[in-house]
Amino acid sequence: MTKTEQNADQLITHIIKSIENAKGLDIALLDLRELENTVCDYFIVCSGTSNTHVDAIAGLVGKEVSKELKEKPWHTEGERTGEWVLLDYVNVVVHVFQKPIREHYDIEGLWGDAKITLFSEPK
C-alpha cells in the first residue's frame, strides 16, 4: 500500500466516523479508481434530514478531519443553502445531501460502474 493510499484510507475512515457521529444517513463509499476520466479516487455520499443537519454533518467532518489528520478541504460548496454540501479533499470528495436533492442528482446512479460500499442501509 502506498503512502497516498494509506492517507486516503485514513481520511475515509475519519470522514465516515464523523458522519456516523453526526447521525448522517445512508452512507455510501464509491470507489472510482478503476473508472476512466474521474475527478478523484473516492466519493463519500450521505444524507441529512434538514438544512441544519446537513450543515452539522459537513461541519463535524471538517472539524474532525482537521483535528485528527491536520487536513482541510481544498474546496467547499453549498454551505449557504444546506441542501447539498460538498467537501473536496482532492482524492476524496464528500457529498452531504438532503434526501430529495440526493435522489434528484442520483450520484450513485451516475457513477453506477463504481464499486459501492454501503455503511448504513438506506432508510
Image (cartoon, rainbow, N blue to C red):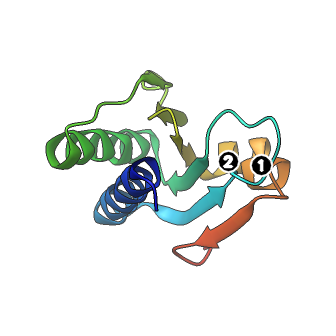
Provide residue 113's location: percent of width, then percent of height: 84, 58
For label 1, the crowd category at 10 Å Cα-Cα, with few meaning under 14, some 14 to 19 and many 20 or more, is: few
Towards the viewer: 53 or 121: 121
Circles 1 and 2, Cβ within 8 Å, touching? The answer is yes
In the picture of the structure, the residue carrying the numbered disc 2 is 102
* Left or right, residue 84 beside residue 21: right
Q: Secondary structure at mark 2?
A: helix
* Residue 77: assigned label: none
Q: Secondary structure at mark 1?
A: loop
Provide residue 13's location: percent of width, then percent of height: 37, 62
Quadrant that contains the C terminus: bottom right
Residue visible at 62% across and 52% down in the picture: 99
In the picture of the structure, the residue carrying the numbered disc 1 is 106
Q: Amino acid at mark 2?
A: Arg
Residue visible at 49% across and 64% down in the picture: 25
Residue visible at 80% across and 49% down in the picture: 35
